Image (cartoon, grey):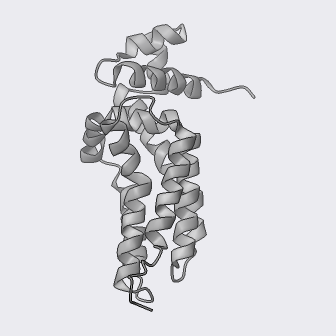
Amino acid sequence: MDRTTRERILDVAQDLFIEQGYDKTSLREIAERMGFTKAALYYHFPGKADILGAFHQRMHGLIDEPVSVLGEGAVTTDAFEKFLTICIDRLQANEKLFLVHRVNQAALAKIHLEGHQGTHEELEELARRVFSEPTLGADQRLRMAAAFAVAFVTPIMAGALSPAGTMSGAAMADCLKDVVHDVLHPARLVVPGES
């Protein structure tokens, strides 16, 4: 399949943003790796922030399909676990995209300040619906919020706190799914003397 010029630019920029960071990567460098002028790059992306924004939109796109698993009605713990499992698999399958976000958090924070609130408002509405589901007990809603953090925040923290290369993406995904399951469906501890 022939990749578009825009996709090839994103591939090159993705590698550079991972290797040296967004701030240290210039449009000239991206254009040189592509084999064309900076002006040609402007045809596809008016600025470097637009490239980073395209990565961020791709990240949002990774959860569009999994959201459909939640349906329109009441969200169950099992449906939420399925949603998180699909999200973890998608993040693992798009490891470089996730790494761009992890390495360039400060630059991405600026994008959040400068706009694209529509997508975030939709996600916030989804979170409100899920985490305030009246058919679930407060403990279940708390577990769902904690499981969400496991799926989306823990990989960022684990990457920042552990030496590089300590766990493959697939191993991390499997571990995250296990932890999500344990958080959502905790094994009941049997205390001696209790029945």
Residue at the spot x=49%, y=15% of the render? 40
Quadrant of the image occupied by residue 120:
bottom left
Q: Position of residue 164 (x, y in %)?
A: 40, 28
Q: Is residue 1 above or below residue 157?
A: above
Q: Is residue 21 visible?
A: yes
Tell me where residue 149 appears, x and y as whole percent.
Answer: 37, 59
- Say above or below: 110 vs 1: below
User: 107 or 83, which is in the foreground?
Assistant: 83
Q: Relative to 53, is 114 on the left or the right? A: left
Question: How far across and how far down the image is residue 184, in percent?
Answer: 46, 71
- Give the answer, above or below, for where 119 lies relative to 15: below
- Count of number-bearing discs: 0
Residue 59, placed above or below residue 38: below
Residue appearing at x 43%, y 67% in the figure: 183
Which residue extends farthest front? Answer: 193
Q: In percent of the image, x 30 and y 18: which residue is there?
A: 24
In the drawing, does residue 82 fall left or right of residue 124?
right
In this rendered view, identify the residue nearer to me: 150 or 19: 150
Residue 47 shows up from this direction: no
- Corner quadrant of residue 161: top left
Q: Quadrant of the N terminus?
A: top right
Q: Position of residue 118 (x, y in %)?
A: 38, 57
Q: Quadrant of the C terminus?
A: bottom left
Name the residue located 46 percent from the left edge and 44 percent from the top edge.
57
| Direction right: furthest residue | 1
